[in-house]
Image (cartoon, rainbow, N blue to C red):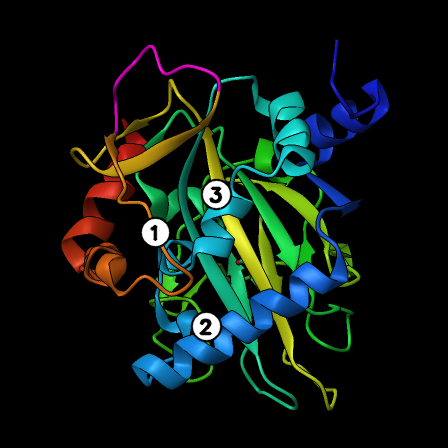
Amino acid sequence: MPKVLSEEQIKHYRENGYLGQMDGIAPTEARAMLADLTAFTETHGISAGQLQMKGHLCFRRSYELTFNDRILDVVEDLIGPNLMAFASRFWIKGARDKSFVSWHQDSAYFGLEPHELVTVWLAITDATPEMGCMKVIPGSHRGKSYTHEETFAENNLLARGQVIHGVRNDDAVYLPLKQGQFSCHHERILHASDPNETEVDRIGLAVFFIPTHVKSTIGRRTAYLVRGVDDFGHWDKDPVPQSRLDTGVIEHVRAAGERYIDPKYRQEADLSEKR
Ligand SMILES: O=C(O)CCC(=O)C(=O)O
C-alpha cells in the first residue's frame, strides 16, 4: 500500500521515469536556503553549485532536508522503505545565464548497481521552461544505455560536458516547478536543461536517493541512511554538518567532487554499465 502516491502516479513513474510538481518545502524555507547559499559564497569564495557531488552536506538545512518526510514518503513509494542519501548537487543558473545541461543519463557516471536511484529535484526558486527548468525524455529509462561524448564545453554545467547526441527535443517533457515544489526522475532517464533567459535566478537542489541494497561498483564510498534499516552495509557513513555552514565537512565534499571528475572514476563507472 503506497504512503502518498496514487497507483496511477507509481505506474506513471515506472513507465515514464519521472513525476512532476509535488509539494516539498514552504517558500520561506526555500528562501532560507537561498540565504545559506549566499552566505556560503561569501565565506568560501565559491558557489556551492561548483561542488559536484555532495553539496547538501555543506549546510545543516540541506542535510536536514534529506530527512524530510514529505519528500521521503514519495521516494519510499517509488523505491521502498530503506533509503540512503547518496549525493546531491545545487544546480544554479543566474539571470540571463548561458549555462545549460546537455542530454545525459546519470547512470553512466554514478557507478551504482542496480540502477534504481531516484533524483529529487527541489526548486529553491521557481523553475519555468524560460528559466531553463529540467526536461526529460519520457520512457527513456527503459531504453538503452547511451555513449556520452565528453566535450568539456563552456557553459555546460555537467562536470565533463558529457553529451548524448541525436536526442530529439520535440520528444521532451518540461518539468516546471514553483519555489518549494519538487519532481523526481530515474537514474537512467535522458534529461537536460536550457539556458536561463529571464532576469531572475533559477536554483534547484537535486538529491540522489538509493535503496540500501544498491552497491557502489567503484569501491567503497559514503552515503547515509535517511529512513528504514540498512541490512547490507555497502556504504561508509558521510560526516554530518553540525551547524548552519559547517566548515568541517567541506574537505569531504570537495574530495567527493574531485573523485567524481577524475577520469579513472569515469572509466570504472562506465565499465559497470557493461558488466
Ligand atoms: O538542474 C538542471 O538543470 C539539471 C539537473 C540534472 O541534470 C540532475 O538533477 O540530474
CA gap, disc 3 and disc 1: 21 Å
Disc 2: CA contacts within 10 A as few (<14), some (14-19) or many (>=20): many
What's the mark number on residue 109? none
Q: Nearer the viewer, mark 3 or mark 1?
A: 1
Number of marks in the image?
3
Q: Earlier in the sequence, mark 3 or mark 2?
A: 2
Contact? badges 3 and 1 (CB < 8 Å): no
Find residue 44 and report its image quarter: bottom left
Per the rendered image, the range of residues in magenta is 228-235
Mark 3 beta carbon near ligand 1 (under 8 Å): yes
- Which residue is drawn at the image coordinates 25% and 34% (left, top)? 237
Which type of secondary structure does the marked residue at label 2 adopt? loop
* Residue at image mark 2: 157
What's the mark number on residue 208? 3
Contact? badges 3 and 2 (CB < 8 Å): no
Picture layout, residue 230 above or below residue 136: above
- Which residue is drawn at the image coordinates 21% and 55% (left, top)? 252
CA gap, disc 1 and disc 2: 29 Å
Tell me, yes or no, if residue 257 can be seen here: no
